[in-house]
Image (cartoon, rainbow, N blue to C red):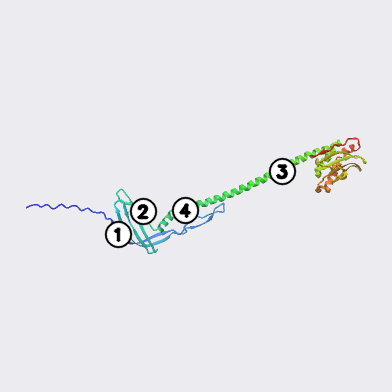
Amino acid sequence: MAFTPCPTRKPAISRPRLRMYSAGLSYEKSYKNGDPVQVCSPVSGSASLKCPSGSIGAPKDMFSKIVFTESRILLKVGAFAVAPRIEYDFAASKFAAKLPIYLAPNKDKVLTGGLDLKRREEVVADLREQLYPAFEEVQSAAGALADLDERYRAISDRASQAQETIETLGGVVATLRARVDRSVTSLSFLRDVAARLEGTDPTAAAEGAVDLALARTGASAAAVKVGLGGFQRLLAVRDARGPMALTPLALQSADLTVPIRKGKERIGVIALWGIPPSALDGAAAHDLEIIASWCVRALVVSARRPNEPAAPVRRAV
């Protein structure tokens, strides 16, 4: 009996499934935050407002009734695959389409990572959820910067006001210093004039009387003449009219004359020329009478000596 061997059969090789289709219905419950709103409150120590954004109240319950169909297609083993999905939410009346693309395999060449293409609304929602905390921080920082800017402006305004105050005080100090300097000069002048008027030198006394009369009235020229009866001798003169003055200093042309008396006896006269109109008043005449009585003790001796030479004319500078 002959043995007839069976013919050799090649083992079957299983191919991986390259496509898969599915459909289904899902009932989902989720939670959604309320719409963000801005709540403003004043910043302590300034007029600025801080307005953070956030949701008020508890999250809202969201129910979804979704019917979907999807497919998974392996285009290249271990390299490229897609999984398109189309769904419709009856509760929200919204249509959605997704297209995940798998490009990154693991060590076993199983695709696990890639891209997920969604509708624009879903992408915007995801970005809003991811960027909202950063946006809130930026908004808070902007409010802080606005507060700092306002404080800086307030400090700058105060510094400007302080600088103006310092400049004003500097002007006041300069004015007071000038007044003190003038007061010191005036006191020195008055002390010198008083020493001459109370002395025994008739010429010095007459010059002191002329200097004081000029300072009191602002006249351009003054003179003191002494003598009894019809005789008068020029004892002191100050002429500030300048070198171009041609009119002689005559008593007849004087603006004001004040007699110098010893009791009832007239021993001399103080004459002034070029007195400003505002200085021709009763107070000036009274002060000149005091000056005349102040120098009379020294001049009475000179009035009784007609042979003394006359005083030279001095130009006041």
Q: How far apart are marks 1 and 2 (CA)?
A: 20 Å
**Looking at the image, is mark 3 or mark 4 earlier in the sequence?**
4
Between disc 2 and disc 3, the foreground one is 2
Between disc 2 and disc 4, the foreground one is 2
Q: How far apart are marks 1 and 3 (CA)?
A: 102 Å
**Looking at the image, is mark 2 or mark 3 earlier in the sequence?**
2
**Looking at the image, is mark 2 or mark 4 earlier in the sequence?**
2
Q: Mark 3 points at which residue?
A: 176
Q: Tell whether 196 sits left or right of 148.
A: right
For disc 1, the neighbor class at 10 Å (few under 14, some 14 to 19, many from 20) is: few
| Res. 115 mark | 2
Q: Mark 1 points at which residue?
A: 21
**Could you tell me which secondary element the residue under label 1 belongs to?**
strand
> Which image quarter is the C terminus in?
top right
* Residues under numbered marks 2 and 4 in contact, where contact means CB atoms less than 8 Å apart: no
- Look at 61% across and 48% down and name the residue there: 158
Q: What's the amino acid at mark 1?
A: Tyr
Hey, which quadrant is residue 193 in on the image?
A: top right
**Could you tell me which secondary element the residue under label 2 belongs to?**
strand
**Could you tell me which secondary element the residue under label 3 belongs to?**
helix
Hey, which quadrant is residue 182 in on the image?
A: top right
Q: Distance between the residues labelled 2 and 3?
A: 85 Å
Q: Observer-nearest residue: 290 or 31?
A: 290
**Could you tell me which secondary element the residue under label 4 belongs to?**
helix
| Res. 279 mark | none
- Residue furthest right as drawn: 229
Q: Mark 4 points at which residue?
A: 135
**Looking at the image, is mark 4 or mark 1 earlier in the sequence?**
1
Q: Tell whether 11 sits left or right of 297.
A: left
